[in-house]
Image: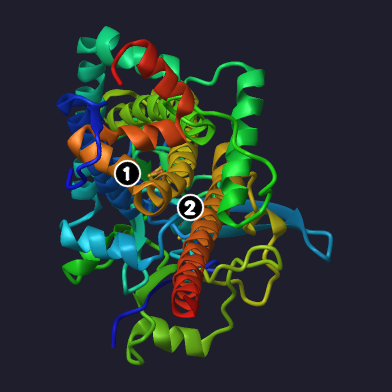
Amino acid sequence: MVAKYVMLADTTRCINCKACEVACRAEWDTPLGYSRDWVKEVEYVNAKGLPEVQLFPGRCQHCDDPPCVEVCPSGASWKRDDGIVLVDHAICSGCELCVPACPYEARWLNPVTNTISKCTFCQPRIDKGLQPACVETCVGRALIFGDANDPNSEVSQLLKAKEWQKLVTDEVNIGPNHYYYTAGKAIPDTVMPKLNERHLSGTLMENIVNPLGTLGIGGMMAVFLGAGIKKLIDRRQDVSNKEVSHEQH
Amino acid sequence: MSSTKPTIKVRTKDVIAIHWFNAFFWLTLVLTGFGIISGDFVRLAPAFWPTFLQNLLGGNANLVLLHGIGGMVWAGVIGVYALLNFKRVVLPFLKNVLVLTPKAAIADVSSMVITLAHLFGLLKHKSVPPQGRYNGAQRLLGTMIIACSLAIAVTGMYLFLSPMLLDFAGSAGVLGGVFRWALVIHLAAVLLVLLGLVAHIYFAVVEEPESLETMKSGEAEVAFIKHHNPLWYAELEREGKV
Ligand code: SF4
Ligand code: SF4
């Protein structure tokens, strides 16, 4: 069976040391100020009136139904059979149509390569049988990565053993493959995915230019097919009329 | 021409060659272009087409390269040809087909509507006004193709070259924004031309195969011109060509 890679983040074990982020930046040599993963720190006052902090390590969620792939005009964004969403840098134009399409803010334009950067679950390492750099470096063992289709994998066991949550809302439910354990605490709104305003040009292309163009060309073809058929019928009628008048003479 | 009816030379070999060059490149560029656009939201061809073409060519990068180079050859050859033959071919052609005033556009649209209605046996009582070398529909199509081809060439060049040559990330989103709008214009212009081409091909193949013949041999039947393009026939008569 094909693998289905997932990432688990046990927020109760995260200590916000940012070792994952440092490892990711080193692994992917991201420019200063940019990172493919992050740790979101949410402070709030709990029901007992006490201050509390929750930590959410995050990255591309390698969604089952990724809008970033659907809007990419060039096919540079694509999804492997094992669920890993990748960007082909040889084709990516840097048009950024995919950036607002991602509700997890996981994509950014790399100023060095001029193409889109995002977490790949460290695909080259996975293909060699290694763990992603962030997982390998996580000092609290808060990050666990593996194949959810393998019943013996650690992630499969953990998914069965604990109550995991996904970052989904009524508005955004695109099948993320990143799970969070919060020991039953609700996930704060600030961490939840949000629909971004798309680029006007992309919306125009998707909702007006392409449908109108397809309809128009289809309509023209139907009209001229109709005209062709009518011409054929008229010709047949002409021929039979001539035959009839010929017989009458 | 197989017919023995009197004919007249109305097209030179180079014009015929550039027409078929244009047609061949259009076909290739449309097929490859529709193969590049893969995303579900923006795709124009059924999903199997990009997959098939990309597999055939060993990936989308090769397809983009082929489309980009093909586009530049298309625009380059036509551009150079137009420059070298501006007075002899381009200027008379532009004079004949460009629809620039609203009055001319209205007249051409109305003659196009009547022509189309006649195909379905409608508006029989209305006759198409006498036509010159090009009829209303051809003039509208010609104007649209010229405008769209320029737009396609310019935007296509930007789409192909800008990611390689320009610093999108360093331009505060401006160059990327231009890229996205160039994509919209490129697509819209291609779709507009395709719309017109459906009619163009139908008329050439089904309704007036004589015109298709002219685009192969360069010869047109005098009787055909007299019947279909009386204003042009009068012009040829004045020039002593018929
Ligand atoms: S998280 Fe964003 S970038 Fe990653 S697959 Fe989902 S939509 Fe795409
Ligand atoms: S920027 Fe995003 S949408 Fe544009 S080509 Fe690259 S991956 Fe595709």
The response on whether ligand 2 sits within 8 Å of label 1 is no
Task: Give the residue displayed 41% in from the left and 31% down from the top.
Answer: B226
Residue density around tag 2, few if under 14, some if 14–19, many if 20 or more, within 10 Å? many
Vertical order, B91 against B9 (above or below): above
Give coordinates of residue B73: x percent, y percent.
19, 30
Left or right: B225 in relation to A50: left
Residue density around tag 1, few if under 14, some if 14–19, many if 20 or more, within 10 Å? some
Q: Earlier in the sequence, mark 2 or mark 1?
A: 2
Secondary structure category for the residue under label 1: helix
What's the chain of the residue with tag 2?
Answer: B
Give the residue at the far front of this rendering: A249
Secondary structure category for the residue under label 2: loop
Q: Are marks 2 and 1 in contact (CB under 8 Å)?
A: no
Q: Which mark is residue A78?
A: none
Task: Give the residue displayed 36% in from the left and 86% down from the top.
Answer: A149
Amino acid type at image mark 1: Glu
Provide the residue designation for mark 2: B42
Vertical order, B234 against A230 (above or below): above
What's the chain of the residue with tag 1?
Answer: B
Question: What is the spatial separation of the Cα atoms under label 2 and label 1, in whole angstroms?
Answer: 39 Å
Q: Nearer the viewer, residue A71 or B140?
A: B140
Q: Quarter of the image containing the N terminus of chain B?
A: top left
Give coordinates of residue B144: x percent, y percent.
48, 30
Q: Which mark is residue B210?
A: 1
Question: Residue B68's image quarter?
Answer: top left
Give coordinates of residue A110: x percent, y percent.
36, 36
Q: Quarter of the image containing the C terminus of chain B?
A: top left
Left or right: B184 in relation to B163: right
Q: Nearer the viewer, residue A150 or A201?
A: A201
